[in-house]
Image (cartoon, helix red, strand yellow):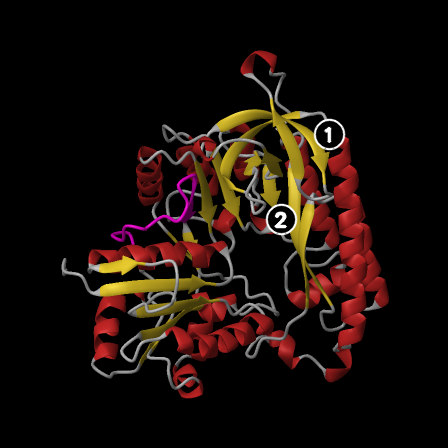
């Protein structure tokens, strides 16, 4: 390992929390080899674009951004593309963007320093092999956030939903050893971080050969200094009784689950190969809520999937109303080359204008429900972890255990602190709050 300065590196990240975590690993790896991280691409010696491939729009955005980055580059700047889009396109991306030097998939980050040096010598390389043993255990992540930490516990996915590119970009599912996850959690706690989010494509299917996700929740939740444990994203099929019991019985595990539904129609779910029915999803919701009173639920929903009829879509709307989600990420179906959904018969394809109209209706229903539930919470008190200065610049932003965003007055020195906050207003999705002194504090609502 070299300790001398190798120049500056800028990483621009798109996509999910796993990509954010990977960027932290890359920054940490390159820092050990003498690279200094910078916050802007202008004049950086190395620019890495860390990409997502889950929807076509995300890829097109990156292609456009690669063109824009030319104006920030010096003659000897190394430009690389990492992440899922790099994995999916491989060497073809080198042909498509002649000013790109490196294309590196999610399992290739160990070789980053040597590949960058090769690029400086004129080599253009695509490294997109899967490594089923790679968990980057010896990497020291450079955390972006001093308040909470993303901790990968699992890579890849075995579910193979018909619309999803992830098994092709992240490979088959494999889990880290529980002891390694606990060690990393202890390290972040030693640096004063009190909240961790465990990451995996189907995180609750975690199994290291000896321990399951229930064991992991209990072990991470017991690490001294950790006050909040979250996880994303689970699969409805993998909420065993053991896992739900661990969630309910581990005080540090937060009362919030992001539970992807994708559709409220059993017919559509079958074509998606989600491996559960509408009734199975509702049963999972009931089991979670029975075990964890006041549980907040958020979700992912796709509209316009091939074969989705008006009746199927109405079933999705009714499912949204029945569950009463706190919020949802909503998308129009985006065909990804190589996935089974792209090979479905043409007559099943939903016209874009129909999908767009359905998306608008879905968003309206979700917003209506969210606003109604949030108005009912006004006047209640919650423990809030202050995370950062808000975009407004005059307020601080924090979250409750239920993952609700609250804006409060205060000084930047309060970041990282926990305060009891009374909710005083809502925009429909975000709350405003007032700090309540400890002697006035009532029992927490969440």
Q: Is residue 120 left or right of residue 332?
A: left
Q: Mark 1 points at which residue?
A: 378
Closest to the observer: 261 or 388? 388
Q: In this view, does 383 lie to the left or right of 193?
A: right
Res 21 → quadrant: bottom left
First in sequence, mark 1 or 2: give its number: 2
Tell me the magenta residue range.
136-152
Res 433 → quadrant: top right
Q: Is residue 328 left or right of residue 60?
A: right
Rendered view: 367 above or below 89: above
Closest to the observer: 381 or 154? 381
Question: Where the N terminus falls, by quadrant?
Answer: bottom left
Residue 350 can be seen, yes or no: no
Q: Residue at x 21, y 70 (%)?
A: 114
Q: Is mark 1 on a helix, strand or loop?
A: loop
Q: Position of residue 78 (x, y in %)?
A: 30, 75
Q: Position of residue 131 (x, y in %)?
A: 33, 66
Closest to the observer: 43 or 122? 43
Res 180 → quadrant: top left
Q: Where is residue 81 in the image (x, y as percent from the top left)?
A: 39, 72
């Amino acid at each position: 390992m070299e300790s001398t300065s190798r120049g500056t590196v800028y990483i621009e990240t798109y996509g999910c929390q796993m990509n954010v975590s990977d960027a932290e690993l890359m920054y940490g790896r390159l820092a050990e080899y003498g690279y200094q991280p910078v916050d802007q691409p202008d004049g950086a010696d190395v620019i890495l674009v860390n990409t997502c491939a889950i929807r076509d729009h995300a890829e097109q955005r990156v292609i456009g951004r690669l063109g824009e980055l030319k104006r920030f580059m010096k003659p000897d700047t190394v430009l690389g593309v990492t992440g899922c889009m790099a994995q999916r396109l491989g060497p073809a991306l080198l042909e498509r963007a002649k000013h790109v030097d490196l294309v590196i998939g999610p399992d290739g980050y160990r070789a980053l320093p040597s590949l960058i040096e090769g690029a400086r010598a004129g080599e253009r390389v695509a490294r997109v092999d899967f490594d089923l043993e790679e968990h980057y255990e010896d990497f020291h992540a450079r955390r972006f956030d001093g308040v909470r930490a993303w901790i990968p516990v699992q890579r890849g996915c075995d579910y193979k939903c018909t619309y999803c590119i992830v098994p092709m970009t992240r490979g088959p599912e494999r889990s880290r050893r529980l002891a390694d996850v606990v060690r990393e959690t202890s390290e972040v706690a030693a640096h004063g971080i009190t909240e961790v989010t465990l990451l995996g494509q189907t995180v609750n299917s975690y199994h290291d050969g000896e321990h399951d996700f229930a064991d992991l929740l209990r072990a991470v939740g017991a690490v001294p200094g950790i006050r909040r444990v979250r996880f994303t994203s689970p699969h409805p099929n993998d909420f065993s009784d053991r896992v739900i019991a661990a969630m309910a019985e581990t005080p540090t595990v937060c009362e919030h689950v992001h539970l992807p539904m994708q559709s409220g129609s059993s017919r559509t779910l079958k074509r998606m190969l989600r491996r559960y029915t509408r009734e199975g999803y509702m049963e999972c919701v009931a089991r979670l809520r029975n075990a964890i009173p006041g549980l907040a639920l958020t979700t992912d929903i796709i509209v316009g999937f091939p074969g989705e009829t008006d009746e199927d879509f109405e079933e999705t709307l009714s499912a949204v109303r029945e569950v009463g989600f706190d919020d949802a990420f909503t998308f129009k179906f985006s065909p990804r080359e190589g996935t089974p959904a792209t090979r479905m018969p043409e007559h099943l394809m939903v016209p874009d204008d129909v999908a767009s109209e359905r998306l608008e209706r879905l968003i309206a229903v979700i917003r209506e429900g969210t606003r109604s539930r949030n108005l009912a919470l006004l006047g209640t008190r919650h423990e809030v972890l202050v995370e950062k200065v808000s975009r407004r610049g005059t307020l601080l932003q924090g979250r409750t255990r239920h993952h609700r965003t609250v804006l409060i007055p205060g000084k930047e020195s309060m970041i990282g602190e926990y305060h009891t906050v009374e909710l005083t207003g809502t925009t429909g999705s975000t709350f405003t709050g007032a700090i309540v002194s400890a002697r006035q504090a009532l029992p927490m609502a969440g």
